[in-house]
Image (cartoon, helix red, strand yellow):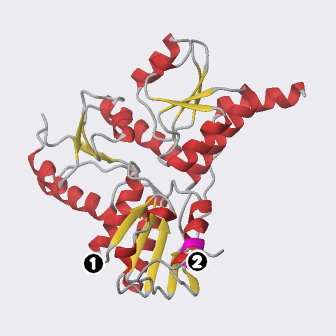
Amino acid sequence: MESPLLPGAAVDTLVLAKLRGFCAGVVRAIDVVEKALAVCGKPVYVNHEIIHNRYVVDELREKGAVTVENLSEVPEGAWLIFSAHGVGPAVVEEARRRKLKVIDATCPLVTKVHLEAIKYAKEGYSIILIGHDDHIETIGTMGEAPEHIQVVGTPFEAAAVQVPDPAKVAYLTQTTLSLDDAHEIVAVLKQRFPKLHCPPKDDICYATTNRQNAVRALAPKVDLLLVLGSPNSSNSMRLREVAEARGRRAYLIERASDIRPEWLAGVKTLGLTASASAPEILVQEVIDFCRTRLGVKRVVEDPTVEEDVHFSLPYELEKLLREKKAVA
């Protein structure tokens, strides 16, 4: 028996952002956990959620991955994976003290920011890290040089931040920020510190940039935008904010069941995108829901740039896989 249409639903068209969902760093992180389970056995422990998506974390837990927030929860000598968001040196040292066998799934683009922080600190710069001070990625970057780094999250904070030497200041950014917000904060910093040193390449990752640009292009074409992602995912929240900044109503959902009938009043064309940490299986779930419960007759994709980025597995995991293959 088919499910009835939601009351008042009269959506005609669903427009998908063609560029959506998993980025190369997320694909790599999930692959690391699955391959580690295959070669190391169960359980494998993961420091923090491997990516910020409940569905993915639950799927990996069922396969034998145990998420922990404190290394004291990990038995001595066990296998530990650092999540895609990265960790600071203190966490690395604690893992070493506990004799944990570590596989580092940090996204290479986050590692790049860590290395920039180390370089600037060694050169005596005051580092302004543009980001959210409670985000796990920012906490990890801060850990590289806490005495040199201050976190700034708004233009107001950028206007108030104090440094010992205004002529020797550098900035870095969290990889999943809003492009608009970051540019606004950088503009304030450049005005205050004319000799501000910029990272050699933008720290906001290609996937964040591309998905935000896709939403900018899609927003004017729809009456309402749904963003598939998790509330603790920075890149998910930024996509919703980008749509709202373009004058379009937008809601963040984790599953199709989160869609509320009251959102849909007067909506003929519905937009859908997925954050870099949201799997395609959930996109298809929303598409099916729109067809069966919202009466959508037409599903189209809004064209965007193509991505062709791949990251290799961590060296330590590659080594384990080679050793297993040699024994087999």
Task: Measuring from the top left, give residue 250's x and y in whole percent.
Answer: 35, 71
In the image, 221 versus 319, the foreground residue is 221
Q: What residue type is disc 2 on?
A: Thr
Q: Residue at x 53, y 57 (%)?
A: 278
* Residue named by callout 1: 247
Q: Are marks 2 and 1 in contact (CB under 8 Å)?
A: no
Lower position in the chain sequence, tag 2 or tag 1 = 1
Task: List the single residue furthest toward the right.
Answer: 328
Task: Measuring from the top left, give residue 64's x and y in whole percent.
Answer: 65, 32
Q: Residues within 10 Å of mark 2 (few under 14, many from 20)?
A: some
* Residue named by callout 2: 292
Quadrant showing the C terminus:
top right
Q: CA distance from mark 2 to mark 1?
A: 28 Å
Q: Residues within 10 Å of mark 1 (few under 14, many from 20)?
A: few
Task: Measuring from the top left, give residue 324's x and y in whole percent.
Answer: 82, 28
In the image, 188 versus 133, the foreground residue is 133
**Is 316 situated left or right of 123 in this image?**
right
